[in-house]
Amino acid sequence: MFFKRPGLLIVSLAMLAILTVLFALLTGSADVSYSSAIAALFGQAPENIHTLVVELRLPRALSAFAVGGLLAVAGVLMQVLLRNPLAEPYILGSSGGAAVAALIVIMAGAGAALVDLAAFGGAMAATLLVFSVAQGSGSWTPARLLLTGVVLAAGFSAATTLLLALTPDRNLRGMLFWLMGDLSFAYQPWRLLILLALITCAGWTAARYLNVLARGDLQAAIVGLPVAGWRIGIFAVTALATAASVTTVGVIGFVGLVIPHLVRLLAGSDHRVVLPASALAGGALLVFADTLSRTLLAPRQLPVGALTALLGVPLFLILMNRSQRTI
């Protein structure tokens, strides 16, 4: 572990998050100087700079931070719930379930509220399905859980493909881009930021219970922890975080897998540190990836989900290699 003092890690990640947001404000097809960006934040810049920084780039950057934090926290909670370091919304099909439910409701012409509700139900159903199928009539194993999640995620991917095949051509490109992760229309970050803050604070408050639950149901039952109630609560929270992310930016993978591994490698497994650190690191990663997605081939934009995969896969392999060396 590089950080013997957890507070130093939290402060470092908070500074990193601020720097990535500032980088997002300064970078784009139209460059903005540091002084102009700061002036725009305080309402002292010309109208064109103010519009670009405050009304376009800042809400998008904050939305990316909130979604990245939610996905990372959901990954941490899923890994506690299922006691599997590979558990996360994308791999275990929660994101796919939310996407399928949201697409069905969108194709039916429903409003935004029903889309959000359908995504929450889809994420919850997918999570419950993975857990129940993996458990079967006995106890589940990490390999069985992972295999079940991968198979169900593939099934949701097939269902998504079928829905896209039935979609009118005029809507197809936008839906495809959304499914690969798109922050082009994510300009209302406050709801997501509030949700991230509430989940992170609640998880930090209950961190000692999460530490016990991560050791297994038997250990939790010995100390008198109501395992069934905690499972339901964690199911609901992870489904809510996943649904909020999917309905805002589409399906984005690897954030909930890589970030908790990185944080645990740096600071151990105490969830009083893992949860807030994962929220900050996940948010910073997605802000950075989104900035790259809109600047690498500007004025064209790349799907941010593809970039998180390109960043996440090699980083995860490096982390796995390092963790094996320390065993």
Image (spheres, helix red, strand yellow):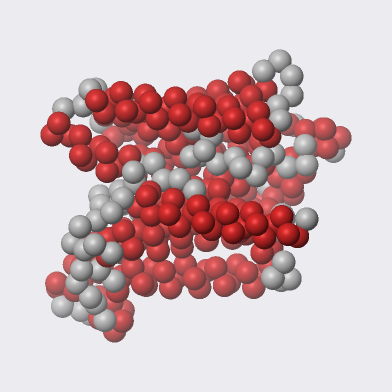
Q: Looking at the image, how many numbered discs can be counted on the residues?
A: 0
Judged from this view, the residue extending furthest toward the right is: 222
Residue 119 figure quarter: top left
x and y, in percent, of residue 244 in the image: 41, 41
x and y, in percent, of residue 318 in the image: 59, 59
x and y, in percent, of residue 130 in the image: 57, 26
Give the residue at x 20% y 57%: 300
Q: Is residue 325 above or below residue 240?
A: below
x and y, in percent, of residue 157 in the image: 40, 30
Q: Is residue 5 left or right of residue 255?
A: right
Give the residue at x 60% y 37%: 234
Residue 277 figure quarter: bottom right
| Residue 44 seen in the current view | yes
Q: Is residue 225 left or right of residue 35?
A: right
Give the residue at x 45% y 45%: 253
Q: Nearer the viewer, residue 108 or 172?
A: 172
Q: Nearer the viewer, residue 189 or 87?
A: 87
Q: Nearer the viewer, residue 276 or 101?
A: 101
Q: Is residue 174 left or right of residue 58?
A: left
Give the residue at x 65% y 57%: 321
Judged from this view, the residue extending furthest toward the bottom is: 35
| Residue 62 seen in the current view | no
Please state, as top left, top right, bottom left or bottom right, where the N terminus lies in the image.
bottom right
Q: Is residue 215 above or below residue 165?
A: below
Please state, as top left, top right, bottom left or bottom right, where the C terminus lies in the image.
bottom right
